[in-house]
Amino acid sequence: MPDQKTQNAHNVRLAIENLEGSLIREVAESNIGREDVIPLWFGEPSSATPKFIKKAAISSLNDDQVFYAQNRGIPQLRETLADYVSRLHNKPIGIDTLTVTASGMNAIMLVSQALINQNDNMVVVGPVWPNCCQTIQVMGGEARQVALHPDNNGRWQLDMDELFSLCDAKTRAIFINSPGNPTGWVMNESEQRSLLSECKRRGIYVVADEVYIRLFYDGKKAPSFLDFSEIYDPLIVINSFSKSWSMTGWRLGWLTHPPELGDVFSKLNEFNIASPTTFVQHAGIVAIREGEKFITQMVEDYRHNRDLVFQRLAALPKVKMSRPEAAFYAFFSIDGMTDSLEYAKHLIDTTGVGLAPGLAFGPAGEGWLRLCFAANQDILSQALDRLEPALS
Amino acid sequence: MPDQKTQNAHNVRLAIENLEGSLIREVAESNIGREDVIPLWFGEPSSATPKFIKKAAISSLNDDQVFYAQNRGIPQLRETLADYVSRLHNKPIGIDTLTVTASGMNAIMLVSQALINQNDNMVVVGPVWPNCCQTIQVMGGEARQVALHPDNNGRWQLDMDELFSLCDAKTRAIFINSPGNPTGWVMNESEQRSLLSECKRRGIYVVADEVYIRLFYDGKKAPSFLDFSEIYDPLIVINSFSKSWSMTGWRLGWLTHPPELGDVFSKLNEFNIASPTTFVQHAGIVAIREGEKFITQMVEDYRHNRDLVFQRLAALPKVKMSRPEAAFYAFFSIDGMTDSLEYAKHLIDTTGVGLAPGLAFGPAGEGWLRLCFAANQDILSQALDRLEPALS
């Protein structure tokens, strides 16, 4: 007889039964495809993958790159990634520290599998894209959220003492998403240095989700732990092709990790997916080698969108927001609004604009809404025209 | 300070550190790409994905099917799968029981995540492809192998009493791979009925890995639990596009499960990979709709290969094997051979033929070797020419 304390009526683990589904999906799912709704709820560019990347996938398919690949990714992709991250962070980073994954999401799952035994915990800086927390819970662990606090100008700030007060003997890692989704928060290098050094002292990992590192409006890239870390530091960095190369539906990402973890991630890839789709990996090579012009133009477009959205939303008396320094989200609070889930649903009915409720990103997000501005500017203007009266 | 009993020196879980890597990879990895070696070690067709499937992927890419998809898979693919399995099993099977996954491997990982709390166990019928056992260990559970026994004719037999003697209060499922890799064992319907009925009585799942169901040499398909199961039975069936449609590198599979598990697998997909590669899913639709002729021809080719390999290997006095009824493996023992890993490495050096060591499939596989005959017939003949003197 199954133990009723650990499994539900269908003999599924309670830890899985109790996983909170995505509240963004709760708002969006029944409204997907509605022609009268402008969907700005997901974190996804509205423009498709650029042609040169699609062409690379097609040529790889025609080349019969359709067989199983190496567990840590095809060697040419790992070499290309090594070149790319070495250039980006201005120091040699070898392929022994790189493992290709089937998306940033899957990379986060592999990290939780590697680190989290039952009852272990990870401290997660929020508001944050919630899925990292659920991977911890899938492993029987606990996600402890420490909240960023908006200062008087609406700029998000991390209190490091508060963060470490949540750590105990069962803490295996600190999860940092900078540039941050949904806040646009960017951790500066001095904060990163002191966080990594304290984690090193405590023997716990920094797990840095840096998928928005290239979507930065004040330079070529946002500050990264990899800019100053040393090879054996307890640091695992997650990255993805989804945002920087507009490849959300492709499912391709990578991990940068201490070389001793190579075997761990090789095995975990084998037992999770074997290896990401082979011809997608070949397209990834071309994305990186030929993608810089595309990224530059995309960031330029997003910067215009950011300015447009910030000017118009921040001008509303009931709205509080800071100008995002990175990523492609406007995250704003509304005076007196206390139920973001209901409010986001209500906005769809009254304005036909689809936003993500702040609560989806943890308790610190309640009272806030997220708008993804990775959209066509005309559509964005139209969405703002509709939102302004409702938010005034 | 990390607890030294649960984490290794790099603060990685001991359960992960201790995962046995693939012994097939141990034989193959350093010899991949050697022109003098005939590689029959992996379970992979040597011929590439058929053109009509590649064309479907290309047209889907040109159509910009490159965005995030629904967590349980795109609706058209789930509908196509529902049609397919309904026809295959001769009864209506609805899309509410179907979830698309990023490969059969990933499907197995999702099942272990759904069912296995720390210290739970799953009983696995072996010799078997080992990866299902490692997914259980990743979740902190225990994989208990019950061995099939070869009868005097070398035909593998399951002792149901032995199987259930391994079950206890922490047993969440029985894992059955029929048709079996590496044995070619096919469980018959009466065995399947009594297994499912006993599992129902005990409140544990049958997890049936049926990825070889179409590679059957005595009819259109091998017996399946889905032929007679009822919708609310504790049954989860794993399937994949890899073998039947020659799509190993594409990473696409699916689960058939009780409808109440739909939300569970939807959430688990979200937190593992979001959804398989979107344009790969579109290609999957075409694979199923237009693939029957391809499958028929492929099985015909494999049947010839099977006969060739069986005739020549079984004729050797030191070799014991039964004629595989399904799948594409010759699994054979050699008199006096007790270290299959060393022997497989030795065979590469002496004959240039790459086989998989039986030990890779569990303790019951020691003394055996696996040859994948999903290869070109001339290549197979050449491999047999080289093997015969060595095995005599």
Image (cartoon, coloured by chain):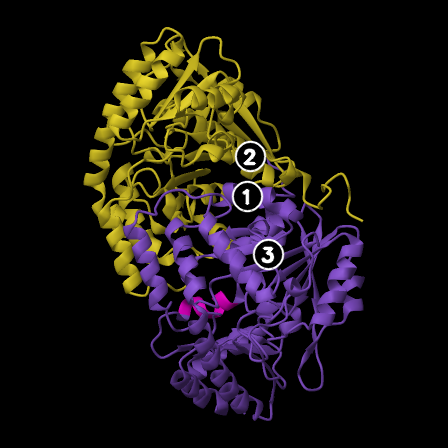
Chain colours: A purple, B yellow
Camera-side residue of B122 and A200: A200
Q: CA distance from mark 1 to mark 2?
A: 9 Å
Asked if residue B270 lies left or right of residue B179, the reply is right
Q: Residue furthest top?
A: B317
Camera-side residue of B261 and A286: A286
Marks 1,2: beta carbons within 8 A: yes
Q: The C terminus of chain A lies in which quarter of the figure? A: bottom right
Q: Are marks 1 and 2 on the same chain?
A: no
Q: Which residues are magenta?
A: A24-30
Tell me the amino acid under the disc marked 2.
Gly
Q: Check if residue A251 falls in the magenta segment.
A: no
Tell me the amino acid under the disc marked 3.
Ile
Marks 1,3: beta carbons within 8 A: no
Q: Residue at x 50, y 51 (%)?
A: B264
Q: Is residue B374 visible?
A: yes
A200 versus B85 height, above or below: below
Q: Residue at x 49, y 88 (%)?
A: A308
Q: CA distance from mark 3 to mark 2?
A: 26 Å
Which residue carries the number 1 mark?
A: A266
